[in-house]
Image (cartoon, helix red, strand yellow):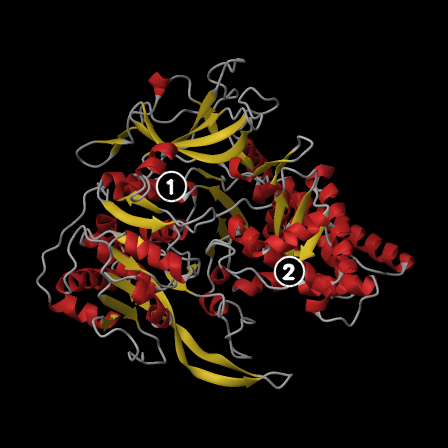
Amino acid sequence: MMYIGDMDSIGFTLALGALRALAFVYDVLTFPVYVILQRPWRARQQSRKIKAVIVASEREQRKSDVSVDMKGIETDITNRFVEPSNNNQAQPITQDTKSITYRSTEQPKNYHIMLLREKVDTMAKLLELVSKKYPNKRCLGTRQIFGEDDEVQPNGRVFKKFNMGDYRWKTFSEVNTLATNFGKGLRELGNHPGENVVIFAETRAEWLVAAHGLFKQNIPLVTIYATLGEEAIAHGINETDVTTVVTSYELMPKFKKILPMVPKVKTLIYMEDQLHELDTSGYQDDITIIKFTDVLEKGAKSDAVAAPPNPTDTAIIMYTSGSTGVPKGVIILHKNLIATLKAFCDSVDIYENDVMIGFLPLAHVFELLVETVCLCAGVPIGYSSALTMIDSSSKIKKGTKGDASVLQPTCMTCVPLILDRISKSIQENVSKASSFKKLLFKFAYDYKVKWRKRGYETPLVNKVVFSAVRRLMGGSMRLIISGGAPLSPETHEQVNTCLCVTIIQGYGLTESTSSACVQDITDMTFGRVGAPVTICEVKIVNWEEGNYRVTDKPYPRGEIVIGGDNITAGYYKLPEKSKEDFYEENGKRWFKTGDVVEVHDDGVVKIIDRKKDLVKLQAGEYVSLGKVESQLKTCPLVDNICVYGEPTQHYCVALVVPNQNNLVELAKKIGLAEKPFEELCENADMEKAVCKELAEHGLKGKLAKFEIPAAVKLVAEVWSPDMGLVTAAFKLKRKDIQERYQCELRRMYAS
């Protein structure tokens, strides 16, 4: 896993022997204590438990959620959940079986039951409930910025760095009042219930306040990623007939170019900057520009009557990040959001003394729902960004603390690309250490992995070896929830081990309100996305073209189809596409995902393919591009990769965004030292060396020879959302990448 480097063989043997002897003595002395205190057999038992079962017949479809009596006390969970058994196959799988439906074995937990008891069926009711339950608790926090200072770098360049203070907090009661005032302020500005309003802003406290203000007035919220290009932004605004846009000081300059493309927009509301006043010159004369705080003041003085939504009213029109073309607006109802909220409350252990750090886009339903779980549990959310998160972030003044060090969060959401970068950063730092430190780190890593698989924690190793890595995120992090794309098993295990946290990953789509499957927190395996959540069922359906069938051995395989109250109402103004992807069956709404999975004996799902990612090469072999990319991304040389396969060719090729430091190290080995990074990316010998490294890494990861790219093009530019080559969740936009690099792709095949 970790590269040790050169070390005198005798010294290496002696050092390793000493570490093993020390560990043996430690194990002998502490083993009885750990057995009694940690009870590892329970951890192993929980990890192996049956987490989902096959639905026996359509007659046994779940009929209701938890039944509660008039006093609001849970009385029955009849016909809703199935107790686990030794055999989860409730019906025989015969050769003519075309689909299998799975259901969770879990039962509702406290917060789920609370939502049912209090009859919370809209987001407006949720905020009212939590503001009464936790009125004086910290709710939303924003870091103070006192000013910007010039910091001279060793090369003489001057960078602007923030002089930052502590977090300033709004209580739950204050957040509820602010949301109420914002909603009423919008009514004063002429926005009516049912008329769409866009929020186009970075993740911050005002974003969530504005969203709940809209929910309270039954005004559908249109979300657009802050990183989208001008045409995609205009598309979302025009398609939803929006007249009012809520944005931020940082994004206001974009509208000088966008406004001529969105003729219906008449009002821009902007969230202020802590340091700068907005220059309003240069905007169209017929546009009203108003501060966020001014809207709050209007609302505080307003006598507008509230217009609370119904469960079947539209809460959000959420534009997808557009990985396969023009972004589509997904119509999310209030009942969809509440259904996923219940599912996440059952799946994720969040405690009242937790602290969450929020930085993923709130325009992504995954982040929005996880933050809503925090609201439900009374957990404070402190906001951050990639520019200020850790002590070494680009906007943090030298000698001052990043957001994580100040906030000391215990939980966060993340996407696999960021976890991949953390993993490579750990490897890079270890590679720069002395030979003995490398040996110590690898020994401690292997030692911890060995005992974790047996159900034990390793507190001494965590403190002595991994505490420095853990302090990067404040030192208190215990839970990371990963979503947006499959997380590679290697990254999952390494970050889990080195950060001393529990990483659980889930699976869902915007169309399923981000929920479908969530990994059980007790599951000690890696590379799986969990069993179905408590509020929906998943169906595995044969995909004959890809040769995936539910009768496959050892595990059923096929396209995953999701059904339940989390399935959204369809695509905005796209009835044909909605009809193609959504359908009703036996009183339940279903969505065809296009993802291919296998389901293990304990009912846990593993993503193995995607229908749109499958390419058939000239010789007839099928290559799953996403699967190959997921494996090759774990190579230290790779920061990002896009694999391409041409059906008329017998091999595939790849565009690789290399890790700069590791590429330079490889260049030294092949005699290309002292060349600039950009020149290395253009060098043919460098490309061949990278191709060879990828081939070796791919074979170790059990990729077939035909799956491994036969040629690569090194790309010096980093793919970011504002380039339009990856989504806000850092998923590849294949079509855009292929168009941008079509000459390079043709050249690789020609060579």
Q: Indicate which disc residue 344 carries.
A: none
Of 693 and 118, the residue lying toward us: 693
Looking at the picture, does residue 340 appear above or below residue 16? above
Q: Which residue bears the numbered disc 2?
A: 715
Q: Around disc 1, counting alpha carbons within 10 Å, would you say few (fewer than 14), some (14 to 19), or many (20 or more)? A: many
* Residue 521: % across, % down: 50, 42
- Can residue 501 be seen in this snapshot? no
Write the residue at 74% across / 41% down: 699
Q: Tag 1: residue type?
A: Glu
Gap between marks 1 and 2, in whole Å? 33 Å
Of 202 and 682, the residue lying toward us: 682
Q: Is residue 269 left or right of residue 397?
A: left
Q: Quadrant of residue 569 in the image?
A: top left
Q: Is residue 672 left or right of residue 270?
A: right
Looking at the picture, does residue 5 appear above or below residue 289? above
Looking at the picture, does residue 253 appear above or below residue 245? below
Q: Tag 2: residue type?
A: Val
Callouts 1 and 2 close, C-beta under 8 Å:
no
Write the residue at 58% across / 22% down: 552
* Residue 452: % across, % down: 63, 44
Q: Quadrant of residue 211 in the image?
A: bottom left
Q: Which residue bears the numbered disc 1?
A: 511
Write the residue at 46% across / 17% down: 90
Give the mark, 1 or 2, whose residue is nearer the N terminus: 1
| SS for dot 1 | helix
| SS for dot 2 | loop
Looking at the picture, does residue 186 appear above or below residue 352? below
* Residue 555: % across, % down: 58, 25
